[in-house]
Amino acid sequence: MLAVANDAPSVFPLGDTIVTFTAVDSSGNSASATTVVTVVDAATLINRLIQDVAAVVAAADLPVGNANALTSTLDAALSSLAAGNDSVAVNQMAAFINQVQAMMNGNNPRLTQAEGQALITAGNAVVAQIQGGG
C-alpha cells in the first residue's frame, strides 16, 4: 500500500507556492519531493499571448496585418481588465479566439493548426482566469 499526501492549498493564490509531496509505502519508507506552482493573473497571461503572436510573426508564419488584428483585440482585453470590466474582457478574448479560428481555416489559412490551437488554448486559459477558474 502506498499513501501520498501533499500540503497544497485548496485554492492557489497569485504568485509562487511551494508544494511538498510525501509518499509512504507499506513498510513505512517515505520520500518527499517539492514543486513550485506559479499562478499568474489574467493581464500577465494576455501579455504572454501578445508575445506568442509576435513569435509567430517572427517565424514568418503570420502576416503583420493579421498579427496586428490579434494584438489589437488582446490590447482591448487588457484595457477592459484594467478598467474592471471583466465581462467585456471575456467577450474580447472570445473575439480573439474566433479570429484565430478564422485564420486557421478557409482556403488560405494564415496559421497552422498547431499555432492556432496553442493560441486558442492560451486564450481559454485567460478566460478561465478572468472568470475565477484559472
Image (spheres, grey):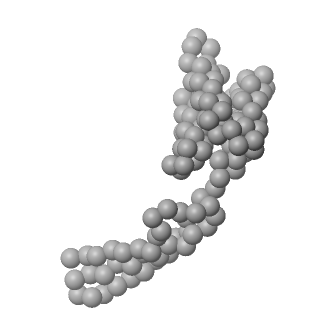
**Along the line of sight, the residue nearer the viewer: 17 or 35:** 17
What residue is rendered at 63% in x and 26% in y? 95
Q: Quadrant of residue 84?
A: top right
Q: Quadrant of the N terminus?
A: bottom left
* Number of disc labels: 0
Looking at the image, residue 113 lies above or below residue 20: above
Furthest residue toward front? 84
Looking at the image, residue 2 lies above or below residue 28: above
Query: Residue 6 in the image: x percent, y percent?
Result: 41, 74
What residue is rendered at 48% in x and 68% in y? 9
Query: Residue 97 in the image: x percent, y percent?
Result: 59, 29
**Along the line of sight, the residue nearer the viewer: 133 or 3:** 133
Looking at the image, residue 21 lies above or below residue 70: below
Query: Residue 16 in the image: x percent, y percent?
Result: 61, 67
Q: Quadrant of residue 62?
A: top right
What residue is rendered at 30% in x and 87% in y? 29
**Along the line of sight, the residue nearer the viewer: 132 or 94:** 132
Q: In the figure, is residue 112 to the left or right of 54?
A: left
Furthest residue toward top? 107
Looking at the image, residue 102 lies above or below residue 58: above
Q: Say whether residue 85 is visible.
A: yes
What residue is rendered at 70% in x and 50% in y? 44
Q: Quadrant of residue 10?
A: bottom left
Q: In the figure, is residue 22 to the left or right of 89?
A: left
Q: Say whether residue 78 is visible.
A: no
Q: In the figure, is residue 16 to the left or right of 48?
A: left
